[in-house]
Image (spheres, grey):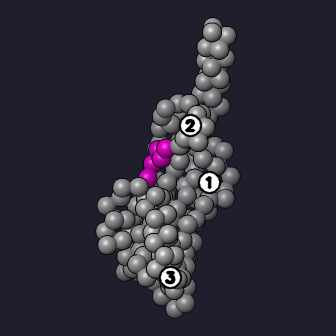
Amino acid sequence: MYIAVAIIALFLGLNALVAPLVYYAKPIHGRVIDAETLQPVQGAIIGARWVLWLLWIGERDSIREVQTITDLNGNYAIAGGMMLRWPPVGWLDFSDPAMVVFKSGYEAEFLSNGLDRNGWVRRSQWDGIEIELKPFRGTPQARLNELYLVLRYCGRSKRCYEELN
């Protein structure tokens, strides 16, 4: 019993030394356009998540979720900010921040981050990039499946629910 407790304490201590307790998310800005007309998409919702993986298998939790909406010219901005790794027995996901972009009448765009994120400063490969949304032309069932994923992704965001209504 004492050996098991000692091993767990050692593992938790090593995890606290390896993974930072505080992270900083750099600001993200960009533009959303219609993939066919190349015109700006006003009112698209952008959701960004930084996910904390916990030591127990299969569990994770968002330590920061931000939603914003595009302006008349399709521009959006997500402010940077500090994030505390709590509980201190996990690490930030390697694809953070993951983003979703959606608007009624368009296919949702799910974006993962491919930049090197091993440090305490996290940046997005989507910063300064134009994101193209394709008009939705699928079946009602395909749309329901997509909206289900968007809701799972956005959590209980009021903006997400308003856009889906």
Determine which residue is flagged by label 2.
54
The residue under the point 51% across, 76% down is 142
**Cβ–Cβ under 8 Å for marks 1 and 2:** no
User: Percent from the top left, x then y, of residue 46?
Assistant: 45, 66
Q: Nearer the viewer, residue 152 or 12?
A: 152
The answer to whether residue 148 is visible is yes
Is residue 145 located in the magenta-colored stretch of the structure?
no
Q: Nearer the viewer, residue 164 or 35?
A: 164
Q: Which mark is residue 139?
A: 3
For the C terminus, which image quadrant?
Answer: bottom left
Question: Foreground mark, 2 or 3?
Answer: 3
The residue under the point 50% across, 70% down is 146
Amino acid carrying label 3: it is: Thr
User: Percent from the top left, x then y, of residue 91?
Assistant: 59, 39
Determine which residue is flagged by label 1.
95
| Mark before the other along the chain sequence, 1 or 2 | 2
Disc 2 element: strand
Q: Quadrant of residue 47?
A: bottom left
For the N terminus, which image quadrant?
Answer: top right
| Mark before the other along the chain sequence, 3 or 1 | 1
Q: Which residues are magenta?
A: 61-66
Q: Residues within 10 Å of mark 2 (few under 14, many from 20)?
A: some
**Cβ–Cβ under 8 Å for marks 3 and 1:** no
Q: Residues within 10 Å of mark 3 (few under 14, many from 20)?
A: few
| Mark before the other along the chain sequence, 2 or 3 | 2
Give above or below for 136 relative to 152. below
Amino acid carrying label 2: it is: Leu
Question: Foreground mark, 3 or 1?
Answer: 3
